[in-house]
Image (spheres, grey):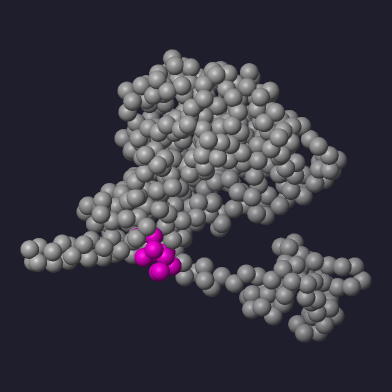
Amino acid sequence: MDTKYDGIVKDIKNQLLNGYLQAGSKLPSVRQMSEKFSCSKNTVIKAYDELEKEHLIFSIPKSGYYVVNEFQRLDSKRTTIDFLSAGPDKNIMPYIDFQHCINQAIDTYKEELFTYSDQQGFYSLRIQLVKYLQSLQVFTEPERLFIVSGSQQALNLLVSMPFSNGKKNILIEQPTYFGFIESANLHSITTFGIDLSMDGIDFDRLEYIFRNNDIKFFYIVPRFQNPLGHSYTNKEKKKIVELAEKYDVYIVEDDFLGELDPNTKSDPLFSYNPSGRVIYIKSFSKIFLPGLRIATIVLPPKMSSHFSRYKFTADFNSSVLSQGALEIYLKNGMFQSHIKKIKELYFGKMKHLQEACEFFLPNNTLYTKPASGFYLTIYLPEHVAAKQIVQLLKEQHIFVDDASRMFLPEYKKENLIRLSISQVEDNQIHTGVEKLAHCITLINSKRSATSQYKIQLL
């Protein structure tokens, strides 16, 4: 049974939801609310304090309580099925826990917040990150870590800066993360591709490219790759590192979803050559809070000064508040608890997605089968264009991604659809895949009817 305190909180929230209270609106006084709900003034103050903690209202001494911002209506969101968005599930993001860490960071780092900090990143945060990375089999020291404003910044800097091997070109998996392709294009870097499937890559081809194409580094996503969801075996990772060492090629390892790996014996490429051949990047955008804009990169010591110069020209140092809050979040154990939750969540969602694909997709439609992660790719029949499917589903408020932007021009395929499970509701997965399958069948039927009509004309 709701108390009068609960009734006040619900009343204010309903007014916000229905648009009766706008940003800046003044709430009824404590006396007015106590009369309306026939309760003590202390009950009203307690309810208002709760709403203030949730950042829905704020108080001005000797003036009253006011609305911070109106609620956004969620009606349209409820009618959509989102296989497109690739940020973390909003229902499991640790807003309240991290809010405590931000508040504590403000108290702890009052002076640092308003001055320039260590360009390499808070040393105390780097210590915590070294401890955390050990759980991912990345053993290093704080002096080799740089804090960057998201992994995209790290990748962009690595694309543009010279490497000690004196080479100029880059190798990438095909397909791969489109943000990296954009960076390479903007810097006019010659970029080679190597075909990737769920069976992996052709190692003879990899060795040929390493030997003959002046490769500065090989950009690789070893676990739950975007967009395929592919993961390399430990044996394959070791072989890649050996070839890179043999031909003086650096490896840039983007391990952005490594925490989701259900295989506890799976290692990063970094573990096979921790001395400096592998440059390791760990982002917190997908597994934690994208708006935090914090990632870390582990560099070989001889690259630190060059990277530092390029980082300086980008932003001098990354957000001090974000660094301080993340340090506290790592130190107090909240992060490990959060990782445990998301690991179970995304594993379950991926399992449901594959079950739906198995049940609904036509027999001639193949799809990848990652063990976990965010992404699964559907290979449409050759005559079915991804853009057609995207448009048909969009008309039904179902959003999927055309993976053609994830290819270099000479590798481009127009029949790949990427599905992301990170923000789709679990109970919408089967419905979304069923409608996707219906679109494929519809296009197939139209093609068959057209072909039959041409045959009759002949």
Residue at the farthest front position: 458
149 shown above or below 3:
above
Going 81% across and 37% down the picture, which residue do you hit?
Answer: 116
- Is residue 395 found inside the magenta-colored segment of the image? yes
Q: 273 left or right of 288?
A: left
Percent across and percent down for residue 385 are 32, 55
Residue 229 shows in this picture: no
Q: Nearer the viewer, residue 334 or 394?
A: 394
Going 65% across and 47% down the picture, which residue do you hit?
Answer: 292
- Is residue 35 found inside the magenta-colored segment of the image? no
Q: 72 left or right of 177?
A: right
Give the magenta range.
389-398
Q: 165 left or right of 320?
A: left
Going 43% across and 44% down the picture, which residue do you hit?
Answer: 406
Percent across and percent down for residue 154 are 60, 35
SS assignment for the magenta stretch, majority:
helix
